[in-house]
Amino acid sequence: MSMRLEMGMFPVSEVVLGDRTVYRGGTLTVDPAELRELVLLDGNLGDVSFHTAKPGESVRITNVLDAVEPLFKVSGPSCAFPGFLGPAKTAGEGRTHKLAGMCVISSTYFVGPMTGIMTYREGIIDMTGPGGRYCTNSETVNLVARYKPIDGISNRAHDDAVRLATLKIASHLAECTVSMEPVQLETFELGDADPALPRVVFVDQVMHQASMVQTFLYGKDLDDSLPTLIHPNEMFDGAVVGANYKTQQKVPTYIHCNMPLAYELYRRHGVDLQFSGTIITRGHRNNQALKERSAHYVAKLARLLNADGAVLAFEGGGNSTVDYWLTVQALEQTGVRAVPIIYEVGRPGTGEFPLVFHVPEANAIVSKGMQGDRIKAPEMARVVGSQMVQLYGGGERDAKEAFTMASSDYYANEWAMDLNRFTGKAY
Amino acid sequence: MIEKVRIVHYINQFFAGDGGEEKSDQPVTSHEGPIGPGLLVDKILGGRGEVVGTIYCGDSLFAKEEERCTAEAISLIKGFSPDLVLSGPAFNAGRYGLACAAICLAAIEEVGVPAVTSMYPENPGVRACGKRVYVVPGGDTVADMEEAIENVLRLGLKLAQGEAIGNAEEEGYIPRGMRYNEISEVPTSQRAVDLVLKKIAGETYETELEVPRLEEIAPPAPITDLGKAVIAIVSEGGMVPVGNPDRLTGSRNKNWAKYSLAGKDSLPVGTFISIHGGFNTVFVNEDPDRMLAVDALRRLEREGEIAGLHDDFLSTCGNGGSFETMDGIGRAWAKEIKASDISGVVLPAT
């Protein structure tokens, strides 16, 4: 029985603060007092303020945690962001309304001690200038929720509170369209396709290590999990929520909800392939044995789906690239042709070795570009978030000023480069 | 824009018509205008340029006296005031290919003139060209001469005119070992799906990333008598004394440091911390022996299982480390270790 999701789109070209929350003709008016009351209700946050940032504006957004595209389920089982905003019933069916082209962006700071990987790494969004294509959300209309932590609160508790508040805001905003007719309606259903067409699966390796480096599936982190099946419609409804603050590698929630490979396979289902399934797994598994177990598990799931081929997405770096390549290897050895998308760690023009790890079976690789471009980012008229920022591995800087940024300081840089079609070329 | 590009053509004694192997000691010789394949070069140029001079030399002589022959060739090349030096096509002739590489390198570096060559991709001359000289790939036999010349001239003329040179695939040269970012016209996800469909169908496909081959290193034989062995600890886990006196960085680190374990039976909390930015350091900071296992190795030493624990601990941080940097550090450590009486190394890794 196939899952059918109707996504009702309400394109947003402008967000303004006003005295009520309403969507009209592409403009979303937002009542900040109403949102503030909603967010502070649980008593987990010190305060919140709201700010807007539009593409092309001279604005730099700092201390960014997540970017969430507003979703609200108007009919059908479950809810948007299931496991967070409601019970973890299977989503991906019925009708969901989406405020398309905008994001609620969470910006905050942490007051507890940070060590090793359990550290927030500064992620910057430039709404204008050459940095715009190195970060996500320079092309979305943004409502920034700037949160203040409660005195002395642990980082974990603050992180959880911010996440829940941001998802609540996002869903609440989309809810204002509940009785409206969508401007556009897209239907997502994987119906019957010519059985002679090749069967392709999407393997999504997401990131999980510890607090500050997490991904949630139906409200629970992926810490002790096996690779598992998911329907792309569930992802479109917000079943996968990002909570990873390794800024360069991270996947913002709105991209989990709009995974390019899922869209591409949907587009071509019945045309030149059959979109046979989606497998979600995590990287950074704790030792070699667990990495191998996971890699073979993914390959086995692909085999059970009768896959001829797999395309893979990767959120991670370093140690988790071992998980990724072992997965490619296990798929190939099982007879499933595997094409991974990966970014290159060798910096442009240096001739540095491009990968952290590699397997000989991976002879069909898509490159989403190289780390290490340096960008002359201009001075900005306005900073949303803290004005003084600590860049990863660097000192404190004034975020209003012009300075030369490493691509790795930009928010969700690896995914911006994917969406903006960066690739590495041999010279 | 140069109206008519002046080209000096370097070839070997065989293509100059002097003879084969028996004439490969032919000294460096200069000739006005084109000879042999140079006539075909002129024809294909069709007025866009001309071979104003030809320099040739015997392959054997060049191989034996590369420096002297190159110097002689260069001073002759200067005399022609060329806009471009073209050497070859060398096909799969190894000594000829190496000579072509040397001539082109010298033309660029000593005369300041653009240079280009053509040869079969497996010719050792390609490697000699390294990152400095453009090599246009050609076939491995003389039958491929015309196509090789057409292709090498296409790039050569661009170089002579000072035009910007794009990536290897679009310009038709052998990649020189560097990569740069570009923006594709095709969305990333579409490229991935296109590629997997080709692979499934058994069609020819091209990877976007050719992974360079790594040097194969044969591991040495295992230690036969551990009881006689002194063991050293080295680590890339970012372990440093509190305060990080040598300022190792938590990511993209370039340095290493040496810390003494002399007289230490274990590493309790406060002796070391990890500054590594890629893993959860809380547990290692609570008990550094979880990473470095000095307590365990000292016990093995006391029990006679190993002869001893080396006094020095070699430390670096591998997080985001470039391959080349870490390779260099490994080699430096190997040198250190070989200079002492150490039989084996334990490398706790993250």
Image (cartoon, coloured by chain):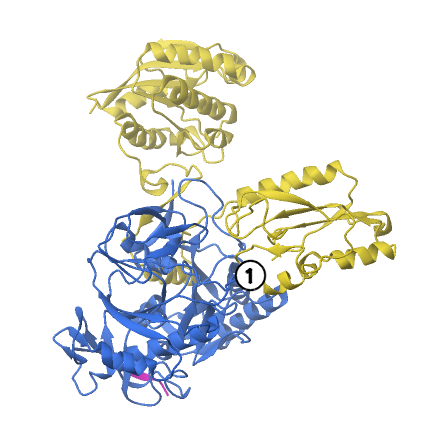
Quadrant in the rendering for residue B341: top right
Residue at position x 43%, y 36% in the image: B176
| Chain name for mark 1 | B
Which colour represents chain B?
yellow
Q: Crowding near pointer 1: few (<14 within 10 Å), some, many (20+)?
A: some
Q: With respect to residue A370, does B99 lie above or below?
A: above
Q: Position of residue A65 (x, y in %)?
A: 37, 67
Q: Quadrant of residue B152?
A: top left
Quarter of the image with the N terminus of chain B in it: top left
Position of A45 with respect to A155 (left or right) is left
Q: Inspect the image, locate mark 1, and give the three-letter code of the amino acid beneath it.
A: Phe
> Where in the figure is residue B149, as x and y percent of width and height?
34, 28
Point out residue A294 in the picture as x, y percentages from the top left corner. 56, 70
Q: Nearer the viewer, residue B72 or A143?
A: A143
Q: Per the image, is A200 magenta? A: no
- Please indicate, yes or no, whether residue A196 appears anywhere in the rendered image: no
Q: Which residues are magenta?
A: A1-6
Percent x, y of residue B117: 39, 27
Q: Which residue is mark 1?
A: B279
**Drawing shade for chain A:** blue
